[in-house]
Image (cartoon, rainbow, N blue to C red):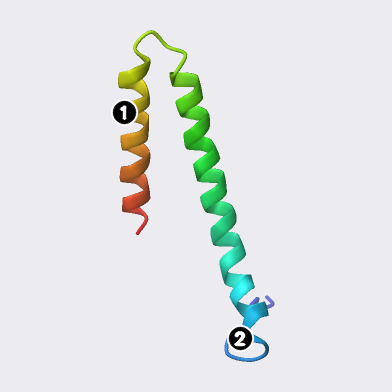
Amino acid sequence: MASNKTDLTQGGILKRLLQVAVPIMGTQLMQMAYNLTDMFWLGRTQQSVVAVAASGLAGMYLWLGWR
């Protein structure tokens, strides 16, 4: 089985930095879009203030849990 390893200590720093940063930025963008979609949908409910606050709080706790 072939090994898929990349040596991040060799070559240009910008290319290596982007190889690490772009997937992280993409993941955070998807998570933010998911949370915003939840808030938009919950904002249409009868108890929208409580629902949006709970969704925002849950998103914050998930974000803190990943750190």
Q: Is residue 44 left or right of residue 63?
A: right
For mark 1, give the secondary structure: helix
* Mark 2: few/some/many CA within 10 Å (<14, 14-19, 20+): few
Asked whether disc 2 touches disc 1, contact meaning CB atoms under 8 Å apart, the reply is: no
Can you name the residue that lies furthest to the top here? 46
Q: Is residue 46 above or below residue 21?
A: above
Residue 11 in picture, x, y percent from top left: 67, 90
Residue visible at 34% across and 43% down in the picture: 60
Q: Is residue 18 above or below residue 12?
A: above
Residue 67 can be seen in this image: yes
Which residue was labeled with disc 1?
54
Q: Is residue 37 above or below residue 6?
A: above
Which residue was labeled with disc 2?
7
Q: Is residue 32 left or right of residue 54?
A: right
Identity, as a three-letter code, of the amino acid under mark 2: Asp
Q: State the residue in front, 51 or 7.
A: 51
Can you name the residue that lies furthest to the front here? 49
Can you name the residue that lies furthest to the bottom here? 10
Q: State the residue in front, 2 or 40.
A: 40
- The C terminus: image quadrant: bottom left
Identity, as a three-letter code, of the amino acid under mark 1: Ala
* Camera-nearest label, 2 or 1: 1
Residue visible at 55% across and 52% down in the picture: 27
Location of residue 53 by image quarter: top left
- The N terminus: image quadrant: bottom right
Residue 6 can be seen in this image: no
For mark 2, give the secondary structure: loop
Q: Is residue 19 left or right of residue 43?
A: right
